[in-house]
Image (cartoon, rainbow, N blue to C red):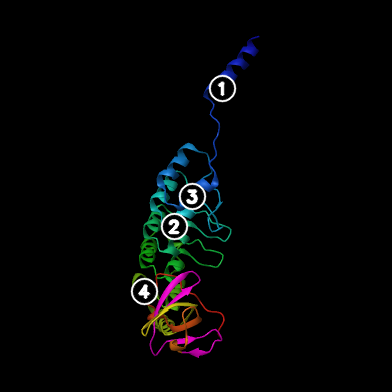
Amino acid sequence: MSQFKCVICLFMFFLIFWQPVVYCDSNELIKALESNSASEVRNLINNSRFDINSFYNDSKGNSRTPLMIASENGFDVIVSILIKNGANINLTSNDKVSALLLSSKEGHYAVTKLLVNSGCNLGLRSKTGFTPMMAAAVNGHTGVVSIILEKCKENRPNISAQCNDTREALIAAASNGQRTIVDIILKSDPSLSGSKEEIYRILEQAEDSLKSISGRILEKSESGITIDGFGQTQIFPLNERTRILNQDCKETSLSTLNTGDFVEIRMRKNQVVDVSQKIWSLKSCE
């Protein structure tokens, strides 16, 4: 009889105090993350049950943790919330992409600083061999490169072991015409000064190389042309060093073309007016 009473008591206890586990919908989580809704993310963490270090498909179909999604979008408040609630800052995706690499590639200064100061691994490489500093260097993100270089100066074995990519970042920056990044890295690391002549030779070749962009003409004038490159707009100056190729890959003049015509613009990198949008490499004309 006493055993029966114990079972009844336990049953009543769980009936009163047990609360069902409520799992948030993954779409709800992704929406909150990608819309930069810090209050909603905090609410989901406090009132729902989900693994903060699990991988979810973002709106682009990429497998990412919540921290990776927030980092890639530059949402520093959400990144801070996730870290404080146990997000693993060093997790990598199937293609070995980390939160730091994503924020560095996009040039998100505040997020990168948060991740670096939280102790994330500076040397994690993607499947393509890129480190966060290399990704930032290629894309010309001076602030991000400076943050990582400053952290690398800390004279600690675990940090030094993560900073063996400085020369690679330097070469990557030079190869992509990122003169300011080249100057920053050379100033930060005197041991690379012996390579200065070689690096500036690579840099000058990159700055002098031709850039190819393809798309359809939206507008044209005597001084410039507006191209719709697969949904994004680019504005380019026209002068004697700019070549225009038509859809048959033959050089032509702007006067022979009409709005809506498909063209390839070949010009030197340092002539690009609007560099805020993506630049498309043309594959059709050799």
Residue at the spot of label 2:
73
Residue at the spot of label 4:
186
Give SS at disc 2: helix
Q: In the image, what residue occupies the spot 44% across and 86% down?
A: 254
Q: Please name the amino acid that badge 2 sits on.
A: Asn
Give SS at disc 3: helix
Query: In the image, 208: left or right of 24?
Result: left
Give SS at disc 4: helix
Instruction: Say which of 79 and 194 sits in front.
Output: 79
Cα separation between marks 2 and 4: 30 Å
Cα separation between marks 1 and 2: 43 Å
Q: Do the residues labelled 2 and 4 touch (CB within 8 Å)?
A: no
Cα separation between marks 1 and 4: 67 Å
Residue at the spot of label 3:
31
Q: Are marks 3 and 1 in contact (CB under 8 Å)?
A: no
Foreground: disc 1 or disc 4: 1
Name the N-terminal-most of marks 2 and 4.
2
Cα separation between marks 3 and 1: 34 Å
Q: Does the magenta stretch include residue 232?
A: yes
The label shown at residue 15 is 1
Q: Magenta stretch: give its range.
A: 226-252
Q: Do the residues labelled 1 and 2 touch (CB within 8 Å)?
A: no
Name the N-terminal-most of marks 1 and 4.
1
- Pointer 2: residues within 10 angstroms few (<14), some, or many (20+)? many
Q: Please name the amino acid that badge 1 sits on.
A: Leu
Name the N-terminal-most of marks 3 and 1.
1
Indicate whether 150 appears above or below 241: above
